[in-house]
Amino acid sequence: MTFNDEAERFQNLNLTNMMERFTPFQIDQILAKSEIQWQEFLGLLSPAATGLLENMAQAAHKLTIEHFGRTILLYTPLYLSNYCVNQCVYCGFNQANDIPRRKLTLHEVELEAQAISITGLQHLLILTGESRQHSPVSYIADCVSILRKYFSSISIEVYPLSTEEYADLISAGVDGLTIYQEVYDQQIYQRLHPAGPKRNYSYRLTSPERAGDAGIRTINIGALLGLNDWRYEVFFTGIHAAYLQNKFPDIEVGVSFPRMRPQFGDFEPEYRVSDSDLVQSIAALRLFLPRIGITISTRENAFLRDNLLKLGVTKMSAGSSTAIGGHTDAIDSIGQFEISDRRTVKEMRETISKAGYKPILKDWHDLNAGRIDETTSVT
């Protein structure tokens, strides 16, 4: 059994009708519980819960402190290549877009690593466009071998791989996977992915499980909010995360809440996701899954990220660029999308500290003799 089977069970339910039946009184009752089920998670995402956001936020904050303390892990993305064979209509790297294409040489990868490592960051997320020809697994492994000299944790956000390929990259030094389903509604998914291997909904959906089977240390999932009704997408993201936690109890499972940002092309998201919608999403997920990691990236502006910090977030990006070579010489590169919060790592550390939290630059170290968990703040 895979999550594909679990998803089909929920997709046969009329979730919208179920959400509309909740009342504010029922939401109060849910908030009084120490543990909630998927039906109650649905209630926390319902319209009836919008008037109780303050209560939800306070409960989410309390749970986060209990399970994570006052810490925020910092990381940054490194884009290796923007070659892509898919035609995702919402993405700047869309194969049909007429943009300069580039792939970092191994020497350029090292220059990027050196530039990032100066900031003190030890957690890195490497990304490529989805082109096996231009960014084969062997190339990604070669990049990881270089990056391992500078970083204690390397996650990948690349095209879906087989279990064996994930195992190969883990052997090379990868310990984390980030992969967004983008949109869980299958009909909308097909419409937004008109061409390319990404049209295979099920293969992408089960990628986290293949990585889990291969022995990955962390898995991060999410939906791109704005492509469908946010309540539906956040619900399925939460159900997916719960499934992964249950199936892989030794793996650290996390969720991101990326909202659509302007990108190269003329795509406009059909669904609006307000700041309060995002707050409700984060609070509801924290109450449903108290141990889940929650990431807010530089897609969001500085003011909002600062205010989300105490709501339930455990991980934030800093010093980000979505362009190839973005940390050194991305003069002519077009990013995958426009980032909003352009603060440096130093500025983010100061902001987090002023809020009474501890910025974590390294919480994991891998030795040949075995894996050791640690919590280190570089000041």
Image (cartoon, rainbow, N blue to C red):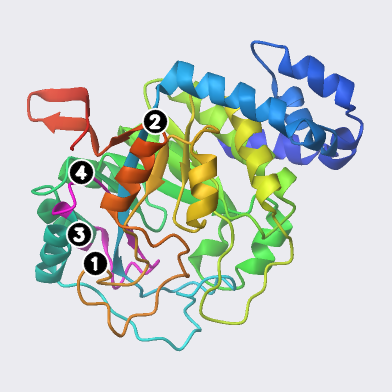
Inspect the image, locate mark 2, and give the three-letter code of the amino acid beneath it. Answer: Gly
Q: Secondary structure at mark 2?
A: loop
Q: Quadrant of residue 111?
A: bottom left
Disc 3: which residue: 138
Inspect the image, locate mark 4, and give the three-letter code of the amino acid beneath it. Answer: Gln
Disc 4: which residue: 122
Cβ–Cβ under 8 Å for marks 3 and 2: no
Give the residue furthest to the front: 354
Asked whether 295 or 196 is in front, the reply is 295
Other residues around mark 4 within 10 Å, as few (<14) / some (14–19) / many (≥20): many
Inspect the image, locate mark 3, and give the three-letter code of the amino acid beneath it. Answer: Ser
Q: Is residue 240 left or right of residue 108?
A: right
User: Separation of disc 3 and disc 2 at Cα?
Assistant: 43 Å
Residue that appears at 46% across and 42% down: 295
Magenta residues span 117-139
* First in sequence: mark 1 vs mark 3: 3
Q: Which mark is residue 356?
A: 2
Give the residue furthest to the bottom: 98
Inspect the image, locate mark 1, and give the three-letter code of the amino acid beneath it. Answer: His
User: Separation of disc 1 and disc 3 at Cα?
Assistant: 23 Å
Residue that appears at 68% across and 17% down: 36
Q: Is residue 376 left or right of residue 262?
A: left
* First in sequence: mark 2 vs mark 4: 4
- Mark 4 vs mark 3, foreground winner is 4
User: Separation of disc 4 and disc 3 at Cα?
Assistant: 23 Å
* First in sequence: mark 2 vs mark 1: 1
Residue that appears at 40% across and 39% down: 315
Residue that appears at 57% across and 49% down: 202
- Mark 2 vs mark 4, foreground winner is 2
User: Separation of disc 1 and disc 4 at Cα?
Assistant: 15 Å
